[in-house]
Image (cartoon, helix red, strand yellow):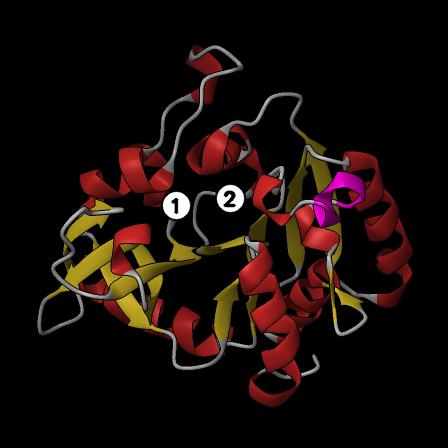
């Protein structure tokens, strides 16, 4: 299985750390976050990874070069002169995956030790009920700051709202997805749009997929390290709640 690892964000809320480092390389107990991701992906059978870059791209490239001799995975970086957004990146590189196999998409600014194999298996079972995408979900302490999903009794996502002012639940988008090739039918054709167009999963794609998405609740550790407070919490929590992958 192949994976998109979205790592191009500027990380403005993590300054001053991101003045000199991309967000995906901030250290977690001495180990770059991107290394934790690469180790996690490899441990669950991912064979090829595409990492998009923008902010301090040369440092991500250098890190990936240093990591390649120590992994059996193929790791490819792609530079975005202008950020394309989560959906824009995947749409622009649809040739990275083939037309028959499922693939993984993950935001590299999350710290997790989740069982990706369980989620991949869950998606495979849900495909018999029409699933095109499975979204990893977590219980958000502040639902108004997240994309919130509503599930039916079979875990089908019947409603999805990005950052709702009045949330109707707390099951939030965890930024980890398993998708089938039909997912591309719901993405913009990047080739027919200006290079600076930005396309976002939460606002522009997921609302089109209601009834064709399923929710998988992540029971393991998951934290977005995108703010200084969250990063500090991750540094304190990871040895105890995470796993040194």
Does residue 145 lie above or below 85 as drawn? Answer: below
Q: Are marks 1 and 2 in contact (CB under 8 Å)?
A: yes
Does residue 33 lie above or below 183 as drawn? Answer: below
Q: Which residues are magenta?
A: 16-21
Element marked by disc 1: helix
In front: 236, or 159?
236
Return the mark for residue 93: none
Helix, strand or loop: magenta stretch: helix
Residue 57 spot, x, y in % from top left: 77, 36
Residue appearing at x 11%, y 59% in the figure? 168
Within the magenta stretch, is there residue 65? no
Residue appearing at x 66%, y 54% in the figure? 48
In front: 163, or 44?
163
The residue beneath circle 2 is 98
Q: Residues within 10 Å of mark 2 (few under 14, many from 20)?
A: few
Q: CA distance from mark 1 to mark 2?
A: 8 Å
Q: Is residue 46 left or right of residue 34?
A: left
Return the mark for residue 181: 1
Within the magenta stretch, is there residue 19? yes
Residue 135 spot, x, y in % from top left: 33, 60
Residue appearing at x 90%, y 61% in the figure? 69
Quadrant where the image shows the N terminus? bottom right
């Amino acid at each position: 299985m192949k994976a998109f690892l979205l790592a191009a964000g500027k990380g403005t809320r993590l300054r001053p750390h991101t003045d000199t480092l991309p967000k995906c390389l901030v250290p977690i107990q001495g180990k770059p976050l991107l290394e934790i991701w690469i180790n996690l992906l490899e441990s669950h059978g991912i064979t090829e990874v595409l990492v998009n870059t923008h902010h301090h791209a040369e440092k991500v490239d250098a890190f990936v070069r240093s990591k390649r001799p120590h992994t059996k995975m193929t790791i490819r970086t792609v530079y975005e002169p202008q950020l394309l957004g989560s959906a824009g990146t995947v749409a622009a590189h649809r040739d990275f995956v083939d037309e028959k196999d499922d693939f993984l998409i993950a935001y590299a600014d999350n710290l997790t030790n989740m069982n990706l194999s369980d989620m991949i298996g869950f998606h495979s079972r849900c495909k018999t009920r029409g699933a095109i995408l499975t979204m990893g979900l977590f219980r958000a302490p502040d639902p108004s700051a997240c994309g919130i999903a509503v599930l039916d009794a079979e875990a089908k996502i019947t409603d999805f709202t990005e950052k709702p002012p009045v949330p109707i639940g707390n099951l939030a988008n965890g930024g980890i997805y398993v998708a089938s090739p039909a997912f591309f039918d719901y993405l913009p054709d990047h080739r027919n749009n200006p290079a600076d167009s930005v396309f976002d999963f939460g606002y522009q794609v997921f609302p089109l997929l209601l009834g064709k998405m399923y929710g998988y609740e992540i029971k393991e550790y998951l934290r977005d390290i995108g703010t200084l407070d969250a990063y500090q919490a991750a540094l304190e929590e990871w040895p105890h709640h995470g796993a040194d992958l």
